[in-house]
Image (cartoon, helix red, strand yellow):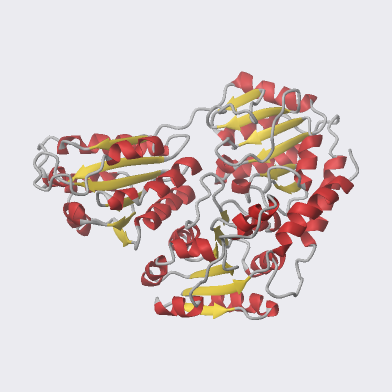
Amino acid sequence: MTNAQTTPRNGAELFVRALENEGVKYIFAVPGEENLDLLEALRESDIQLILNRHEQAAGFMAATYGRLTGRVGVCLSTLGPGATNLVTAAAYAQLGGMPMMMISGQKPIKSSKQGLFQILDVVDLMRPLTKYTRQISNANTIPAKVREAFRLASEERPGAVHLELPEDIAAEEPAPDTHIFAPSDARRPSASQKSLEIACDMLREAKHPLIMIGAGANRKRVSQALIHLVNTTNIPFFTTQMGKGVVDERHPRYLGNAALSAGDFVHRAIDHADLVINVGHDVVEKPPFFMRPGGKKVIHVNFSGADVDPVYFPQHEVVGDIANSVEYMAENCGICHNHDFSWFMEVKAAVDRHLRDKAENDRFPVIPQRIVHEVRAVMPEDGIIALDNGMYKLWFARNYPAYDNNTVLLDNALASMGAGLPSAMMASMLYQDLKVMAICGDGGFMMNSQELETAVRLDLNLVVLIINDSAYGMIKWKQAQEGLADFGLDYRNPDFVKYAESYGATGHRVARTEDLRPTLERALAAGGVHLVDVPVDYSENRRVFDEELAELTRSVPSG
């Protein structure tokens, strides 16, 4: 542990003390020689260094730490290719609103004998992907730059920041009077009284209001306030993909998830609404519905103002702390006798019937509905699933009921493949008493599959479910939708059981549909890292999403 009473020996030690001052517990890293002074300073610190096998995974873990805790996750790379490997994670955190700081090394900037070997302008590279990016050119400025980076990463809307620490600045001795700045204790401002009163008036005047819950609401205080609002007003609600679980989806007023952008049962309800109270959504997430001039009114309730978009231009904004805003509406709106939710409840009944369809179908390979059903059956109420990106994500968003906030980790902003396994690893590290499952396609899993070694080394309790179609399944579905020939998207996979065992994990292969649930139950109960390979039949994609849904949604009588 570094001694805060002594003068830091060099810039690296000063940097680590600044990180300690911010409450940093972990740094996820693939270090290089330019980071050696920082590595030495970390050796004497209480901050735990988590060695990853790829910088992208380190960044995904840091971003997920920020998502789950609200505190800034930190990752570390060397210069050049190490820093460029953080780019996808930077975009993941920035678009997803996850507070994360990246630290990259650099060759000496005052005197270097290596020419331009591995030299890139990483600061400029990170500029469009971050809220703040700086090179540190003087050891004395380290505390100020660290504090500013943490401030900006945490403030609404949270996101990614980057600091470059050159090798010679890390070795430089700071001035004796250099001091570290205390973190800010500023609270988010509340919305104006006038904007809240207007929102309540609009809600009272509406006949068919709906509540939409987005990613920005996926926090404990907001969750509690929204439950209060739904219970005191009886207004039905639906969620975006990243808003899943904010309110227990077993609630009688839950209409469903807008996993698709149009054409699902939920969209019939949205079309019927004359007012949508949009809590915590912005246009970074794929649109759950499209606004049209002269159509329904929308109230934007968020930490920051709306980014106006051709399909999103809210008529009223309530800008400030979301929990406070929602709590005000819950306390001041109440039951309105002019509200009519009867047709919304007919839509809910149709949704519930459809989601039960084929959930227990026995055919093999296993259809997506059965996979989702079995995962929900084996996961405890507080268990966490972390979804990679692929066709199965739509099925889980629609068919998997979430019971609490941040129990379904998915990304519908950057929607990067390769994030599912590192995100689940972070959840398992943070919540060691909870059951955690990574759900990946075979394509997304292989993009960061080397992190199985990290998971085993960290003694994590984690089940990795691989939904295997030996193809880029979502793109094949899109290809078929366009009427194009099946071409260019199939590949061969390794033997996933042997692959898992080669890392010291336990591998399982599901050979019969009825074996899926007991296999998952045994893996969850055993502890350690388990990989379960299940073949999927994706013919249901076309039947349900392209053929059946449009007909079924039209069959619900108009309200």
Image quadrant where residue 319 sits: top right
Q: Position of residue 344 (x, y in %)?
A: 82, 42
Name the foreground residue: 220 vs 303: 303
The answer to whether residue 201 is above or below residue 500 is above
Image position of 511 (left or right of 112):
right
Residue at 76% x, 37% y is 233
The answer to whether residue 432 is above or below residue 202 is below
The answer to whether residue 49 shows anywhere in this view is yes
Image position of 283 (left or right of 174):
right
Q: Position of residue 327 (x, y in %)?
A: 63, 35
Split into 4 quadrants, where in the image is the C terminus? Answer: top right
The answer to whether residue 211 is above or below residue 521 is above
The answer to whether residue 288 is above or below residue 545 is above
Image position of 84 (left or right of 70):
left
Q: Position of residue 409 (x, y in %)?
A: 55, 54
The answer to whether residue 2 shows anywhere in this view is no
